[in-house]
Amino acid sequence: MAPDPESTVDLDRAKVVALIRAHLADELEIEPDTIEEQTRFREDLDADSLDLYTLVQELEDTYGVKMSDEQAAKILTVGQAVDFVLATVGPGARGSAAATQSPE
């Protein structure tokens, strides 16, 4: 499903954090308030490969981003995932070149 062009116009960091927080809280059955931008997926949340795969799918479905396995492996924290989404679909990000940026 392609992202709604109207929703990407007002995309901001807080909205992306909220989506990731809600997804992880539901997937891992934890309180959303325990998830911060510096929260590490594996070390702090004990997320496994399947948990991370479903998060990537959620981001792809919601925002239309494409994330390679190599890119996903470099994303270790909630903040890095947010950075990736914003770099890919945020203001000024256009076309497939933006979708291949690393979160660094």
Image: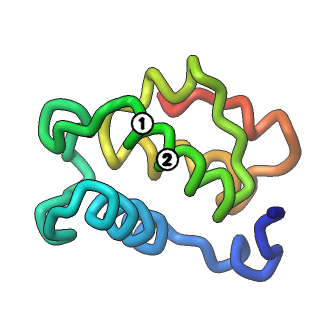
Q: Choose between 89 and 55: the one closer to the eye.
A: 55
Q: Quadrant of the N terminus?
A: bottom right
Position of residue 34 measured from the top left corner of the image (x, y, whole percent) = 12, 62
Write down the quadrant of residue 98 in the picture: top right
Amino acid carrying mark 1 in the image:
Leu
Kind of element beneath mark 2: helix
Write down the quadrant of residue 46 in the picture: top left
81 on left or right of 68: left
> In the rendering, which numbered label is found on residue 50?
1
> In the rendering, which numbered label is found on residue 41?
none
> Alpha carbon of mark 1 to alpha carbon of mark 2: how far?
6 Å
Q: Residue at x 45, y 52 (%)?
A: 82
Q: Residue at x 66, y 51 (%)?
A: 60
52 on left or right of 94: left
Q: Is residue 31 above or below residue 79?
A: below
35 on left or right of 60: left
Q: Residue at x 52, y 70 (%)?
A: 12
Asked if disc 1 and disc 2 are in contact, CB closer than 8 Å, the reply is: yes
Q: Residue at x 64, y 79 (%)?
A: 10
Q: Is residue 94 above or below residue 90?
A: above
Position of residue 15 measured from the top left corner of the image (x, y, whole percent) = 46, 73
Position of residue 103 measured from the top left corner of the image (x, y, whole percent) = 51, 33
Q: Choose between 54 and 8: the one closer to the eye.
A: 54
Mark 2 surroundings: few (<14), some (14-19) or many (≥20) residues within 10 A: some
Kind of element beneath mark 1: helix
Residue beneath disc 2: 54
| Residue 86 shows in the view | no
Position of residue 51 measured from the top left corner of the image (x, y, whole percent) = 38, 42
